[in-house]
Image (cartoon, rainbow, N blue to C red):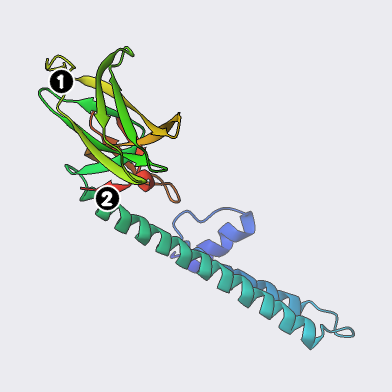
């Protein structure tokens, strides 16, 4: 005796059993909404039927919700695309020098360090003090007077006696003479980009600076 597949399904349904071999399809929100709407129309009180205005209002709400969902998907896709483009642009920075704030840099073997002082006002005298990781002063650069703006400088990696200093992290502190006062100024350092780290959505890109760790891509003042 042959039993049809449909008969087997009817037996499973009557016993409350799950049909393991039956293909399942995932309902969309639109399908769920329409099923609920049809069930509501079938089961409404014939003596007090649903007003046309209420039915249209539900349809309008569904249409609005669907539009918002599509809009959110579009914004997510746009954000992902923008992040990919930013990552591609940032990757071209690997191996290049960037000018960043902070006043610290890593001196390589026999290398030099360059940077700039961001003068807030014109000065008759500008001094840059260079210290090692232990806080000991290794060199002082005395520059002439300059107007407000960026004043570039170069350090040959040597101390005051002309000795080549060992590789390591060095700090730069700038002061300018304004009238009778010495005013601290921001120092920008030229550093080499070793690699780029990607953040999540909404997070800024990070540049990994050789010997210095990470800095925000947004903090870069100049690309050289």
In front: label 2 or label 1: 1
Label 1's element? loop
Quarter of the image where the N terminus is located: bottom left
Q: Nearer the viewer, residue 123 or 195?
A: 123
Residue 158: mark: 1
Task: Please report the residue visible at 34 percent of the width from the left and 36 percent of the height from the top.
Answer: 124
Picture coordinates of residue 165 (x, y %)?
Answer: 16, 17
Residue position for label 2: 90
Q: Can the viewer see residue 25 in this picture?
A: no
- Left or right: 156 in relation to 102: left
Task: Please report the residue visible at 81 percent of the width from the left and 78 percent of the height from the top.
Answer: 44
Q: Are marks 2 and 1 in contact (CB under 8 Å)?
A: no
Figure quadrant of residue 191: top left
Residue 173: mark: none
Picture coordinates of residue 119 (x, y %)?
Answer: 37, 41
Figure quadrant of residue 30: bottom right
Residue farthest bottom in this picture: 52
- Left or right: 119 in relation to 170: right
């Amino acid at each position: 005796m042959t039993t049809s597949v449909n008969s087997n399904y009817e037996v499973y349904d009557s016993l409350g059993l799950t049909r393991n071999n039956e293909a399942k399809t995932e309902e969309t929100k639109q399908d769920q909404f329409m099923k609920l709407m049809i069930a509501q129309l079938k089961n409404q009180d014939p003596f007090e039927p649903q007003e046309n205005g209420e039915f249209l209002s539900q349809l309008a709400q569904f249409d609005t919700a669907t539009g918002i969902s599509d809009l959110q998907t579009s914004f997510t896709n746009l954000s992902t695309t923008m992040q990919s483009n930013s990552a591609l642009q940032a990757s071209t920075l690997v191996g290049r020098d960037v000018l960043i704030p902070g006043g610290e840099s890593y001196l390589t073997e026999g290398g030099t360090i360059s940077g700039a002082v961001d003068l807030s006002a014109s000065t008759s005298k500008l001094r840059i003090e260079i210290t090692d990781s232990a806080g000991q002063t290794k060199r002082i650069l005395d520059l002439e007077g300059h107007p407000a703006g960026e004043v570039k400088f170069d350090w040959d990696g040597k101390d005051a006696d002309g000795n080549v200093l060992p590789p390591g992290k060095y700090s730069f502190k700038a002061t300018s003479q304004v009238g009778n006062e010495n005013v601290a100024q921001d120092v920008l350092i030229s550093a080499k980009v070793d690699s780029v780290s990607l953040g999540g959505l909404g997070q800024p890109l990070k540049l990994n600076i050789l010997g210095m760790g990470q800095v925000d891509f947004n903090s870069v003042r100049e690309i050289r």
